[in-house]
Amino acid sequence: MKVVIYGAGAIGGWMGVRLAQAGHEVGVVARGATLAALQRDGLRLIEGDVTRTVKVNASEKPADLGVQDLVVVAVKGPAMASVAAQIAPLLGPETIVLTAMNGVPWWFCDGLGRDFAGQRLKSIDPDGAIAAAIPGAQTVGCVVHASCLVDAPGVIRHHQGNGLILGEASGQPSARVEALTAALVAAGFNATMSAQIQRDVWYKLWGNMTMNPVSAITGATTDRILGDELVRGFVTNIMLEAKEIGARFGIPINQDPADRHEVTLKLGAMKTSMLQDVQAGKAIELDALVGAVRELGQLTQVPTPFTDALLGLARLHARTLGLYPA
């Protein structure tokens, strides 16, 4: 395939190296120090004691790369408006856009049935520009279960996990997702197909929507967050609100918050991606992780006082640091 990685950060860089090693022609849209590093040294992936380097065609202008078979969008929520404004030169009628992102995506409601299909979340895509630029019919969702970090521009370190779950934005199975899944398996990923990708998005979000913003506010790792009885109770109540919201739009979670806490605790002293962004002075993706849940609560008429409190505190904290728009 002819593939472009839009966002050569931790996950995008990891996927780019694996796809290039599998024989695909990989390009990268990047800028600044990352672009310079890619053009000079290539894209590098560190796994244990092994470093793999691949040459990629890198440019800050999508038009330089042309129409692709696959575009992997691996940016954080705040960058999506910019991606939508620039992505057109990469897209032909048969191009697949694979969204390897955290949180609720702009296409989430498309696979929830007739009561929600076509509903646009203002917290994610306020003016519909993202949906207009990236057609739902060309969009495949991807839930990533892997831990990677950026050691330096263009240098990615893979820590653990190798899972990718794929599914059409429409929530329906398709031959092209089956073929893409097979290609990713051949590239070394533990890739599987989802019967409804919205379920996998929602389940991953169920844990991320609390650990990320609480860590960003407090500076604490996940073990310390869950080790505080009062904070754990606050987190539990937020998760119960989200669980009820999911049940109302047809995605019940057959697990209690305490069960998910046990899974999180097994990961040890984990520093969340949002805490890393705060410490690096980067904009945080609060809307996709918390704002969208609040909005879905309004759509399903589920009261969300605990989610509202988390969103308000995290938003105020980020605005004070200049990491969230006023």
Image: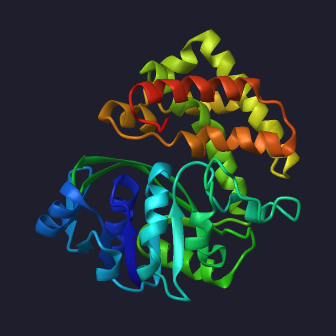
Q: Residue at 44% of width from left, 73% of height from top? A: 87
Q: Quadrant of the N terminus?
A: bottom left
Viewer-closest of 309 and 148: 309
x and y, in percent, of residue 322 in the image: 39, 32
Using residue 182 as the reference point, say whether residue 323 is left or right of it: left
Taking depth in this image into account, of 59 and 260 the one nearest to the observer is 59
x then y, percent, for residue 267: 48, 33
Left or right of residue 287, residue 184 in this image: left
Q: Give the answer, above or below, for where 152 lies relative to 89.
A: above
Residue at 67% across, 54% down: 200
Q: Is residue 258 visible?
A: no
Q: Residue at x 55, y 72 (%)?
A: 133
Q: Evaluate whether residue 313 shows in this view.
A: yes
- Residues 269 and 32: in front is 32
Going 35% across and 76% down the picture, which residue do you hit? 62
- The spot of residue 155 in percent (x, y) is 23, 55
Q: Nearer the viewer, residue 186 or 176?
A: 176
**Residue lying farthest to the left in this orientation:** 40
The x, y position of residue 32, in whole percent, is: 21, 57
Relative height, residue 50 to residue 282 (above, below): below
